Image: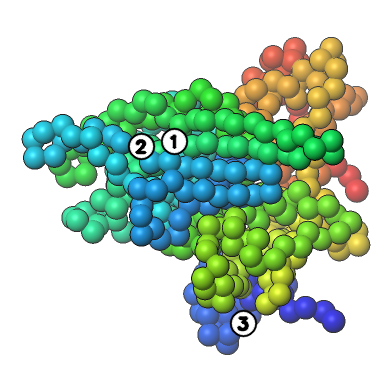
Amino acid sequence: MQRRPPLGQQVFSTLVNNGSAAAARVAREAGQPDLFERVNAVASEAPTPSFLHSALCAMSLPVRRPSDDQAPIIRQDGQYTLVITPKPVVERIDGQQRLTVLGVPYGSLPRLVLIHIMTEAVRTKSRHVVLGASFTEWMRRMGFRTISYGPRGSATLIRQQLDRLLACEWMIRWDSDQAQGEKEFGIKEIKITNEYVGVDRKGGSFVREIYLTEGFYEHLRRHAVPLDEHAIRQLRDSATALDLYTWLAYRLPRVNPKRPATLSWAQLAVHFGNDDRNMRKFRQTVRDAWERHVSAVYPQARAEFDTVAIRLYASPAPLQRQAVAGGHLALVTDEKGAPPAAAPSLPVPLPVAAPARFMAALAEQLGAAEARAWFSDARLEEQDNGWVLVTASAFKASWMRSRLGQALDRAAAAAGLAGAPEIRVRKS
């Protein structure tokens, strides 16, 4: 029996095939008029890369403030364990410097802060991240339209969550049982930063510079998961929707195309840090986030969330979309209508050839994560009229021409080419 697509994907499909008026009507008749706005806000824009460490895609922060917010957070995902421990910091209280434990970060705000910090580090290829001279400007860049101050204002709350994040220590542990009875393990203890400086002025003026630790930055470069900034903006008010989106963005491109991955709700609860005391409410919250939020901004995701189990099917990553008539976006499919398998890693041929030198230089310019996002299926070919960079997607070709010109110029110079290659779409 053909399963009904989630409501978000129904609205998206209607938008692509029948236009905005029909899609708005589907959302309205379902009692979710704002759903069309979410779908349209993402479908009408070219994807913009954001990034998050894979460990935080697989294992999330608390959704709400824990009863003991000074206790470490422990999350597990198969062989991996993530431990986030709040550490004491020096604060000025009543004119005196005192040692205080701020507690663990929680809610949607620290998720947005982490995505922003990690995106800037990947984008600039630097562990020095400058948040901005204006706190209001920084918050607007993260998608906030209304910025309020005062004890419960959005600006005050996000400052508190930022301080909690920067004070925590992170431990990633890997365990494996061997056939001969031995147990292998590996432990990496890191902090996001050991150094950050800032100036807080009256009226909201703000300067904050963060220096990621070398260990965390290098780990991030190797394990950054590409996300779509426009999707993040639409989900920014829901910690559960953000968790589900980033988890699917991490998991779905890695699913075996020949068979789905199946999880129990108890397993998913471990990933999301939910205790088993109210599994029914947890299922309802996640299914609602999938139906009305995540499926609307990640329409190519193929997953099923029924009352018994969760099934994940091989799906394109969030950035793998291509333009169709009318400026909308459609799912990337093969000739049989099936989504493609996860994009392969950027090939690394022998460094003596010009194509290899060019692709290696391009990865150096952009960083490994962004290079994989845009150039995983691209090939540099020598043709009669010179070097041509061939890609499978018209959308990717357009993005490369409009946004990555400087990186292409520098990679061409590093590879010894006479100039940046012409960009073409691969003929089917």
Mark 1 or 2, nearer chain start: 2
In this view, the residue in front, 67 or 120, is: 67
Q: Residue at x 64, y 20 (%)?
A: 410
- In contact (CB < 8 Å): disc 1 and disc 2: yes
For the rendered model, the colour scheme is rainbow
Q: Amino acid at mark 1?
A: Glu
Name the residue at the left extreme: 95
Q: Position of residue 23 (x, y in %)?
A: 62, 77
Residue picked out by circle 1: 169
Question: From mark 3 to mark 2, how far is it between C-alphas?
Answer: 49 Å
Looking at the picture, how far across and down is residue 71, in whole percent? 39, 48
Secondary element under disc 1, as helix, strand or loop, is strand
Q: Earlier in the sequence, mark 3 or mark 2?
A: 3
For badge 2, the amino acid type reads Lys
Front one among 348 and 176: 176
Report whether residue 47 is seen: no
Residue type (three-letter) at the residue carrying disc 3: Val
Quarter of the image where one finds residue 204:
top left
Could you tell which of marks 3 and 1 lies nearer the N-terminus? 3
Q: Is residue 80 left or right of residue 281?
A: right
Residue linked to disc 2: 87
- Using the numbered discs, state the Cα–Cα distance from disc 1 to disc 2 in whole angstroms: 7 Å
Query: What distance separates the C-alpha of mark 3 from that of mark 1?
Result: 47 Å
Quadrant in the picture for residue 99: top left
User: Residue at label 3?
Assistant: 26
Q: Position of residue 321 (x, y in %)?
A: 70, 53
The crowding category of the residue bearing disc 3, from other C-alpha atoms within 10 Å (few below 14, some 14 to 19, many at least 20), is many
Which residue reaches farthest bottom? 29
**Residue closest to the far front:** 181
